[in-house]
Amino acid sequence: MSRVLQSDHFQATPKRRAMLTFLIEEALAGRAETLKGYTIGLAVFGRDESFDPQSDPIVRLEARRLRHDLDSYYIADGAQNPIRISIPKGQYAPKFHNNLADVSAKEVPIEAREESVQAKRPEEVETAAHASGTVSRLPWALAAAAILFVLAALAAAAVMHFLPAQEEQDEVLKPSVMVLPFRVSSTDPEQQILAEGIAEQIMTALSRFPDFRIFWPPSGANGASTMDPVEIGRQEDVSFLITGAVGSEGGVIRVSAKLVHSPSRRVLWSSSYDRVRSRSTLLEIEESIASDIATVAGQPYGVIKSELASTLPAGNEPSNDSFECVLRGYVYRRNFSKQLHATVQSCLERAVKRDPGYVEAWAMLGWIYLDAARFGLTADGSKELAFDRALDAASHALSLDGNNILALKALSSINHYMGNIEEGERLAKKALALNPNDPDTMAQLGWRLAVAGKFDEGISYLEKAIERTRNAPGWYYHLIAVDHLLKGQYAEMLTAAKKGVLDGSGISWCLVAIAQSKLGNKAAAHAALEKMAEMSPELGRDPASYLRSHQASDQIVTALIEGLKTAGWKDPAGD
């Protein structure tokens, strides 16, 4: 607890620091089951005996904030702490965990009882608290403390083991982002709580996206500050700043936000959100707005990476900037340009040699090796060897960070193309669970489900991904167009297919040709077939094999082959 409270990365307010101290001290004293909203309101927040936790949500709200404080701390400075403190949702009694054990390791609870307070209804917790009287819990507290001491000793060597890789990774120059406190013009405490919570939740949500350095605002910055945000960015040497304001009019809460590029003083994005004012939905309002802002800013094809991609230096020489190599990988993955593949592969191979602890570089390299296998781009012509290289690179990335989103997505894709369909889906779902705000993860999961024939589930994910992406890559639309084909919705199919052609892929032109043919536009269908053959000769020669190499279901293969024949495609083999 002292380590957490003394860290600059633990940004809790004085009240939440007092709350954390109170919760831990009470639990260690054997009074974990007496930790309820009423008790905490009196002891920490100065409420009197008339305090009603149901009508005054201060304890619930601040507990929510404290959970985010702890999450942000353990993402940053506390990542290597041997012991991790958490406050499970639905209760106030803290738990201690072995922070360096693998995911299957058991938690070490400090509560005396085996049953979880979280599993009880509020009235049961209240009853248990009043009933717990004479049985001393000191032996249990001492036992828990002993266990924690042993875990700390055992973990010391593990900390030293992990430090070199972390130091190597920290050398990579990633884009820096700071979320400034949102301004509040009113003295309404509800608005002040909302403004503080949105800023904190944006930082938490952004930290789940790879390749960002998230900075806390300087101590002098606050929601009422009139200091120029750009000036703060320059003083703190931060490239991107998110700032905003909270206000209200009538029964509506309005939150405005903008993303500023500090070096150029340009506003890259701005938006406002109106929500009906309701105390019961305050947390939902906070979470939904913060998630949307983090998604717009941080996703692979979001505002920040699109801005950085637009400034990439021209030329084909591999860069000495490891982050730039990963960024070039994202640019390549928009349209899978064969001309870019060799350059990006060379750049990433240099990056992992230069920065062997850089997880995202290993993960992106796994994807590049996969594309060499599935698109026939291997120098030695060995597809199997390319798959092995892809699997090794992505698996190594996951060994460096078992919860890295980019590594999970890469390994999901590799497993899919190697025929391990269920494992590919499992990994994609794990990645989405870790970061529900990443539309690219949604799109990949939706694509995997739909291409295997699970259209109802897959199309829903794809549509959500497109809705949350400002400029979606063409492949987001491929399976949506196929779904329209299977339903006989040819006009809708053409609309989706045309949105995909910007990626220049052969499959997009294949879908356009089929849709135009179904609509009776023979000349347009013929022109699209020519573009298909030009962009993807292998698809033009043997579409069935091409589609099956992507693990497409028999239903999809049959429908597309029949559609191509109707559009005028001639089988070179004469079948």
Image (cartoon, rainbow, N blue to C red):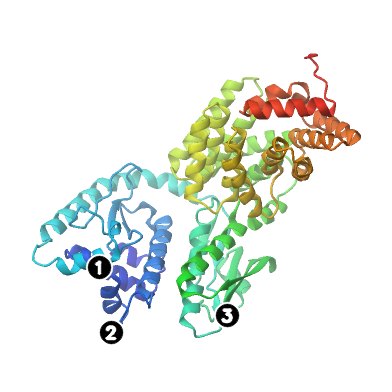
Question: Which of disc 2 and disc 3 is earlier in sequence?
Answer: 2
Spatial CA distance of label 3 from label 2 is 30 Å
Q: Does dot 3 land on a helix, a strand or a loop?
A: strand
- Reply above or below: 572 against 254: above
As drawn, which residue projects farthest toward the front?
A: 488
Residue 563 can be seen in this image: yes
Across and down, in percent, residue 389 comes to 55, 28
Label drawn at residue 248: 3
Measuring 82% from the left and 24% from the top, which residue is drawn there?
569
Q: Going by the image, does 59 lie left or right of 108?
A: right
Label drawn at residue 48: 2
Measuring 71% from the left and 43% from the top, which residue is drawn there?
474
Measuring 26% from the left and 59% from the top, which residue is drawn there?
117
Spatial CA distance of label 1 from label 2 is 17 Å
Across and down, in percent, residue 292 comes to 58, 61
Across and down, in percent, residue 80 comes to 36, 52
Neighbours of disc 3 within 10 Å: few (<14), some (14-19), many (20+): some
Judging by the rendered image, the residue that carries numbered circle 1 is 35
Label drawn at residue 192: none
Looking at this view, is 120 or 179 the one in front? 120
Question: Which of disc 1 and disc 3 is earlier in sequence?
Answer: 1
Q: Does dot 2 land on a helix, a strand or a loop?
A: loop
